[in-house]
Amino acid sequence: MQIIGHLVKDGGSETWQTTRIGDDHLQLAVVLRPRGLEEAERRLTVQNQPWSPDDLVAQHGVRSDDYDALTTWLTAHGLRLSGKSPFIIWLEGSFDAAAQTFATRFEYRLGEGRRLYRLTSEPEAPDWALPLVVAIVGLENVASLKPNYRLPSRSDQLANSGQGFFPQDLITAYQLPSRVNGTGQTIGLLEFSNGYSVSDVNAFWASMNIAPPSLDFVSVDGTPNDGGVNSYDMEATLDVEWAGAMAPGVHLVVYEASSGTSDQSFGLSMLKSLDYATHDTVFHPSVLSISYGDGETRFPTAEMRAWDTAMATAALVGITTMVASGDEGAYGLKEPGRLICHVDAPANCPHAVAAGGTHLVLAEDGLIQEETGWTDTNHNGASGGGISQVFAVPSYQTEIVLPVKSGYQVGRGVPDLSANADPDTGYCVFFQGAPTVVGGTSAASPLWAAILARLNQARSIAGKGAIGYLHPSLYPLGATAAFRSITVGNNNYNGVVGYVCTPGWNPVTGWGSPNVSAFIAALT
């Protein structure tokens, strides 16, 4: 039977061919379905302690006889086992071996400076295997993610005489408590062909009188740190500088993988990074941050479900995954496409904590004078958000109103929460030897990762484990003092009419921006 959801859309008119182009080597990941996932999540919430990896696998992993049957099937036509994770079977081999294994065919073309490949039909699996398999990742390399950052287009509302917000500005505005600073916690920053300069990040922290946090670099697949020499390296630089500034006691780890601009599937890069960080026995992150995305129609649905499964298993062992909700408002696409609403992936994943964007102006005393939803006023972006057409309404959103437009179906609402992201009220960063200003939900995600590191430190002091699966605890706080409800603004963009900010949860800013002291107190 077919495993639905592996075909990728390609709106162009380019001609594909079934004759292979390029080398004959393919990497794949078969993502396995945890047994009793909801039961495992309930226990995590009730006991305030994450699962140990061994207990999670023993009670909710694939049974050994099923695993053996899967590997026998998967290797019968020449694919080889290349690795093993608790919920993933890693494979490699030829395109022909993959086509025979999954009873499908590949097609190829040259484009974007590389060889592209995808399936002509859905992969097939034996009937008995279907309940065990979430997705097969790596069967296409067409889809890719883009960073979610933007530069300001005007300077009249930039803080500090046009220099942008400094860390202390947002520590004051969002009321971060001084009693915790992230000590004992590790934030993993997932970056894709995006490097940083150690001298840049140290110069930033020094200019802000912040002792340099501990910083390590891990290449998941051999992709190097390019040293921040390219313009797009603004992303990793922003992530490192601001995650460290907002939680200076934290240990930062950059997990680097290919962006999909090489032959490797981007979907596989994302999965490798999530899996590596989840099972990292050296640095043990408790929070991950992802500042990349694109509209969910750009990716095979099975690929997104695979990412969500990886985030779900990470949450069970005490790792929360923050994801930027996107900078293209309700339109949601990085490149030209249909003028309809699109939610960003992987922010659409139900186990991702999606961070939307606001426009923040502070008063003379440093407190918030005005905070509205990041609205497109000058063709320079808007807060990503909307209603997923891939994922159903998760249990934690069943009690909120999800505004569904005519012609769309109800689904997971994005974002969950927000923070300043408008580049015109942007953040100061130090990049390629000089200070500059940047914004986007790429800034909101590492900021929230730092908040969660502080929360996990407070929970540790109180004898509790890392929060992990945040959503069931987050949503009951939505209408409390832990959040500042954002009631002005919208995320119309590129001619697509989006959503409006309303009291309570909305698809522009989620529950709003944080009062971090109240947020941490409520969850400790």
Image: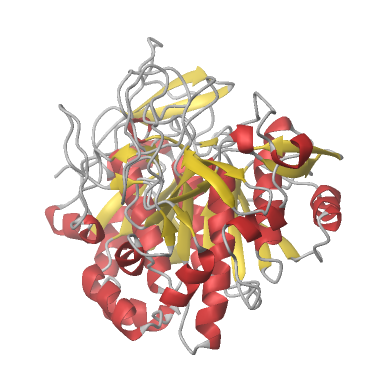
Q: Position of residue 297 (x, y in %)?
A: 33, 31
Q: Residue at x 60, y 66 (%)?
A: 176
Q: Quadrant of residue 394?
A: bottom left
Q: Residue at x 25, y 61 (%)?
A: 396
Q: Of 461 and 3, which appears nearest the observer?
A: 461
| 412 sits left or right of 353 in the view | left
Q: Identify the image quadrant of the C terminus.
A: bottom left
Q: Of 311 and 282, which appears nearest the observer?
A: 311
Q: Residue furthest front?
A: 364
Q: How many marks?
A: 0
Q: Residue at x 58, y 71 (%)?
A: 454
Q: Position of residue 103 (x, y in %)?
A: 24, 39
Q: Is residue 387 above or below residue 68?
A: above
Q: Identify the colour scheme used.
A: secondary structure
Q: Of 99 and 454, which appears nearest the observer?
A: 454
| 296 sits left or right of 463 in the view | left
Q: Position of residue 131 (x, y in %)?
A: 17, 59
Q: Quadrant of residue 481?
A: bottom left
Q: Is residue 164 above or below residue 254?
A: above
Question: Is residue 434 something one can see in this rendering?
Answer: yes
Q: Identify the image quadrant of the N terminus.
A: top left
Q: Is residue 262 above or below residue 502?
A: above
Q: Is residue 507 above or below residue 378?
A: below
Q: Residue at x 66, y 65 (%)?
A: 247
Q: Residue furthest bottom?
A: 463
Q: Position of residue 412 (x, y in %)?
A: 26, 47
Question: Is residue 26 something one can see in this rendering?
Answer: no
Q: Of 125 and 4, which appears nearest the observer?
A: 4
